Every structure is written in C-alpha cells, then in structure tokens.
Image: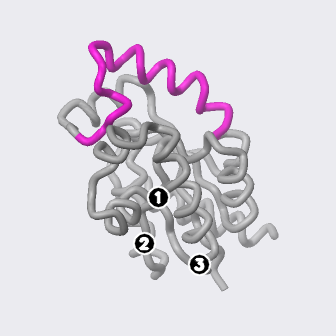
C-alpha cells in the first residue's frame, strides 16, 4: 500500500498544482484541504476568515485535516497555516509522508500577487506579511518534513518528478 503524501508549505509554493501532478503520477486520488472546506461550507476561505476569524477557520481546518489524513493512499495539499496547530503536525507526520514545498518570499509574492482569495495577504505590505508568516511557519514545516523540495522557478512536472523519485527512495529505505 502506497503511503499518503501530504504537501505542506507557504502560500504560493505550488502545493495544489504540484499535488495534482503528483497524484496523477502516483495513481492516487488528490485532495486539497482548503477546497474541501469550501465545498463543505459552500463559501470560500476568505469569507470564513471574515465571519469566524482565523481561529474559526483553523478549527474547521483541523477537523478537515483529521478526516483527510485518515484516508489511505492520497496526495493532500494543505493550507499554508495547517502546520500551526500541534495536532495537525502530529497527524500529518504520523499518517503519511510529509513533503515541504519551499519557496522564497520573492517567488511567493510573484505567485500570489493576482490572488484575491488570500485573506492573510489583505494588507498594505504583502512582503512583510509573507516574511512574518515564514519566520513562524518555516521551522514547523521543517520539523515534520521527510522531504524538502525547493520550487522556485521550476515547472510543475519537474517538481512532481523530484518528489516521486524522493518518495521511491524513502520507501525503499524503510
């Protein structure tokens, strides 16, 4: 049985796009925790943030990650802040192989500049906000990652191939 693969990393690192490609390569179903929350609630993440605040969203995210990580053999793209709660980090690392998609602040800015659905970037200084988020989150991403892949300036298929190769190396050594 193929172990589940959980993608973590900052917004703009490519978790959803790479996750879809990776799932196709591995012949596994793909899920995105934010998209699943939106499908269940019928509203987007920005609306949940607006109505319930970040804390309310994190509760929904925690429950969704618990549910999704119980599925066997999936590729899951998590939200950038999913690793903030200790129970999420514990579930992700215990129930699958965690891959940290690392991206520079510059790359994150480039990839998120057109997005209107990123409530944490609704600020006058997105760069400062991304730097602040990474200073808190990067050590958490690294703490649970079995594999770290830099995504800056790379094609999706190249990143997905590198992850697939790293996963086969991981499973061969266990």
Residue 23 image-quadrant placement? bottom left
Q: Which residues are magenta?
A: 117-141
Q: Does residue 128 show up magenta in the picture?
A: yes
Residue 151 image-quadrant placement? top left
Instruction: Classify mark 3: helix, strand or loop.
Output: loop
Q: Is residue 57 above or below residue 162?
A: above
Residue at image location 50% in from the left, 56% down from the top: 60
For mark 3, what is the residue? Answer: 71
Q: CA distance from mark 2 to mark 3?
A: 11 Å
> Considering only order in the chain, which callout, 1 or 3, is on the residue closer to the N terminus?
3
Q: Main secondary structure of the magenta part?
A: helix
For mark 1, what is the residue? Answer: 77
Please indicate whether residue 70 sits to the left or right of residue 39 in the image. right
Instruction: Classify mark 1: helix, strand or loop.
Output: strand
Q: Is residue 102 above or below residue 22?
A: above
How crowded pointer 3 is (Cα within 10 Å; few <14, some 14-19, many 20+) is rated as: some
- Residue 164 picture location, percent across and down: 53, 65
Residue at image location 63% in from the left, 56% down from the top: 98
Residues 44 and 76: in front is 44
Residue at image location 71% in from the left, 64% down from the top: 170
For mark 2, what is the residue? Answer: 30
Q: CA distance from mark 3 to mark 1?
A: 13 Å
Q: Are marks 1 and 2 in contact (CB under 8 Å)?
A: yes
- Residue 140 picture location, percent across and down: 67, 37
Q: Does residue 115 show up magenta in the picture?
A: no
């Amino acid at each position: 049985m193929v172990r589940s693969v959980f993608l973590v990393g900052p917004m703009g690192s490519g978790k959803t796009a790479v996750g879809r490609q990776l799932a196709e390569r591995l012949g596994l179903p793909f899920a995105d925790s934010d998209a699943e929350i939106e499908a269940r609630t019928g509203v987007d993440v920005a609306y949940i943030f607006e109505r319930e605040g970040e804390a309310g969203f994190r509760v929904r995210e925690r429950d969704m990650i618990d549910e999704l990580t119980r599925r066997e053999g999936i590729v899951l793209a998590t939200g950038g802040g999913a690793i903030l709660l200790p129970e999420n980090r514990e579930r992700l690392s215990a129930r699958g192989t965690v891959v940290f998609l690392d991206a520079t602040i510059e790359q994150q800015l480039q990839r998120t500049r057109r997005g209107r659905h990123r409530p944490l970037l609704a600020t006058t200084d997105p760069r400062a906000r991304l730097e602040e988020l990474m200073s808190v989150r990067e050590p958490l991403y690294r703490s649970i990652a079995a594999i770290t892949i830099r995504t800056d300036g790379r094609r999706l298929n190249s990143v997905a191939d590198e992850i697939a190769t790293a996963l086969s190396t991981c499973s061969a050594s266990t």
